[in-house]
Image (cartoon, coloured by chain):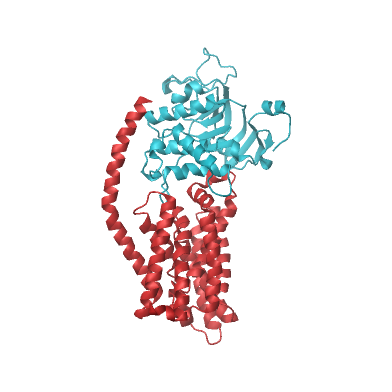
């Protein structure tokens, strides 16, 4: 493990591990309520933050967090209104964020669109010590929310109306999900990149549910898959000169395909078992 | 908790909806609905599609804002009502599967959030969940994915989730819709046991079906107005319905059958 002798590599692996855990942790809830593209939109919005950080000479990670969180609040407001025009409003938010980022970075002295590339696709060599501190703090928040409040968030994403009638603060929890997704986007920025972060929120979850039947199991397996491909992908970029984000995402897609191949016979067996159970159950019903 | 003597609390209606009006968009759906449910009663809300019966129960649980009128639950004005653990709610079942699988037990456990809003599932929570699964005969399916269930089984899960709350008031929106006869019997048995234990029930029904013997009172809505509040109407064939709507507050068995919209 000579790669651990290099401090930049250690920082990259720490950041990769945290991306691996946080992206599917919030992604599971987003997928559950069919909001899988939310991460993608927030990634676009965060671009304005990265450019602002460059322009104002402050940390791009914290600036991206600030802008993405604001974007998430607006997105949640649009979503909760449930208007059909919401799609158009979201498109304006996403592409406004991207265009704003490109515009601002070109206005910055010495800045050009190429400065955004590492934020778009991730690059392990850009993870600074300050970045690691920021990512650790942000990831701790994401993990605390997604694991600590999993029962509440599950209820809200599964059946919002029922959740409200149990007295849960549904509006606050919805906002929390949006803000947590925004924070996850910036956690993933350095390693996976803003344009690929959504893949890590969705693909490990899709892969996991090929084999799982329950929510907790899906959440756990998705995190395990994502953590594995994040660390593997990051390690690979030490030996081969390829961008980390693309490597990790392609690995994740590979795992998804393997899981799909594995699950086909399993699904067939389960369908058969369900049919048998159905017959047993019907006999029970008659007895009652 | 509202203060008050035990005697006055017992007399207070569990649900009191007065002059409720509500609109969906610009369309008025409730136009002055009065609905009172007393402790231990089993009340069915009947009416044709679009009569406002679903909107009425959703208004009772605060999911449809009232443009006028008052609502109180357990004697507390709705704005100050916080005792959600006294209510078990079964929303209308949607066929849309959620994006991530969930087991039957996970869904039913969500009902316990009404009682333990923070922290993990305690032993009492687990016992209540198992009991609720038993009540609807779904304990053998506890670890199955809800997406793999039939419509009737899914409905049993939603009722178990409401029963896991251990509610004093059970509110159900079309619990029998799309449920086959065998499953309807299981559901009726579960509701019967709850009623025997003293639970108050308000439910929206399209037809009385196997629950008929349990129902104390029927409230029939038409075009957002109450057109009947009394004994459950006898189910009659569509062509036997009279041309006019006869509202009879003390409808006896010899009264004319009401047009309930049950079959329209």
Residue A272 spot, x, y in % from top left = 27, 42
- Which quadrant is the C terminus of chain B positioned in? top left
- Residue B8 percent coordinates (x, y): 71, 27
In the image, A72: left or right of A5? right
Q: Residue at x 49, y 28 (%)?
A: B191
Residue A26: % across, % down: 48, 59
In front of the other: A178 or B105: B105
The chain letter of the red chain reads A
Q: B194 or A179, which is in the foreground?
A: B194
Determine the colour of chain B.
cyan
Q: Is residue B11 visible?
A: yes
The residue at the far right in this view is: B4
> In this orientation, which residue lies closer to the viewer: B209 or A243?
A243
- Looking at the image, residue A210 lies above or below residue A45: above
Observer-nearest residue: A67 or A286?
A: A286
Query: Can residue B243 be seen by looking at this rendering?
Result: no
Count every numbered label the image shows and give the total: 0
Q: Residue at x 51, y 50 (%)?
A: A151
């Amino acid at each position: 493990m000579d790669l651990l002798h290099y401090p930049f590599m250690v920082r990259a692996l720490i950041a990769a591990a945290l991306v691996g855990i946080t992206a599917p942790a919030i992604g599971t809830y987003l997928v559950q309520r069919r909001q899988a593209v939310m991460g993608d939109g927030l990634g676009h919005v965060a671009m304005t933050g990265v450019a602002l950080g460059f322009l104002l000479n402050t940390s791009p990670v914290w600036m991206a967090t600030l802008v993405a969180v604001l974007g998430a609040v607006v997105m949640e407001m649009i979503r909760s209104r449930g208007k059909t025009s919401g799609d158009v409003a979201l498109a304006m938010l996403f592409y406004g964020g991207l265009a704003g980022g490109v515009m601002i970075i070109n206005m910055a002295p010495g800045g050009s669109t190429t400065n955004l590339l590492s934020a778009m696709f991730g690059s392990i060599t850009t993870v600074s010590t300050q970045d690691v501190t920021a990512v650790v703090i942000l990831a701790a928040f994401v993990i605390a929310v997604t694991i600590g409040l999993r029962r509440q968030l599950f209820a809200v994403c599964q059946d919002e109306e029922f959740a409200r009638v149990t007295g849960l603060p549904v509006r606050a929890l919805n906002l929390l999900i949006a803000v947590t997704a925004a924070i996850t986007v910036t956690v993933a920025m350095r390693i996976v990149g803003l344009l690929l972060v959504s893949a890590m929120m969705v693909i490990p979850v899709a892969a996991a549910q090929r084999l799982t039947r329950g929510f907790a199991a899906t959440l756990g397996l998705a995190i395990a898959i994502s953590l594995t491909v994040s660390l593997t992908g990051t390690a690979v970029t030490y030996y081969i000169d390829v961008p980390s984000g693309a490597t990790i995402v392609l690995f994740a897609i590979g795992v998804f395909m393997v899981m799909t191949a594995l699950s086909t016979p399993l699904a067939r067996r389960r369908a058969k078992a369900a049919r048998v159970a159905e017959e047993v159950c019907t006999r029970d019903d008659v007895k009652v | 908790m509202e203060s008050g003597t035990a005697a006055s609390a017992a007399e207070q209606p569990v649900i009191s909806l007065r002059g409720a009006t509500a609109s969906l968009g610009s369309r008025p759906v409730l136009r002055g609905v009065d609905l009172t449910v007393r402790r231990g009663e089993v009340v069915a809300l009947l009416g044709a599609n679009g009569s406002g019966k679903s909107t009425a129960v959703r208004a009772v649980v605060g999911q449809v804002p009232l443009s006028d009128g008052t609502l109180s639950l357990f004697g507390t004005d709705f704005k100050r009502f916080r005792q959600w653990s006294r209510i078990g709610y079964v929303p209308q079942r949607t066929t849309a599967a959620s994006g991530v699988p969930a087991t039957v037990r996970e869904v039913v456990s969500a009902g316990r959030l009404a009682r333990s809003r923070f922290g993990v599932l305690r032993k009492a929570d687990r016992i209540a969940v198992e009991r609720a699964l038993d009540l609807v005969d779904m304990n053998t399916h506890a670890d199955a994915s809800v997406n793999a269930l039939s419509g009737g089984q899914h409905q049993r899960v939603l009722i178990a989730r409401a029963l896991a709350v251990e509610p004093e008031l059970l509110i159900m929106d079309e619990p029998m819709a799309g449920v086959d006869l065998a499953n309807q019997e299981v559901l009726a048995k579960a509701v019967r046991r709850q009623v025997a234990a003293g639970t108050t029930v308000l439910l929206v029904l399209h037809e009385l079906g196997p629950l008929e013997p349990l129902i104390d009172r029927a409230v029939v809505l038409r075009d957002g107005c109450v057109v009947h509040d009394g004994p459950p109407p006898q189910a009659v064939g569509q062509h036997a319905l009279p041309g006019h709507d006869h509202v009879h507050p003390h409808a006896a068995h010899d009264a004319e059958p009401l047009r309930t919209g049950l079959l329209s």
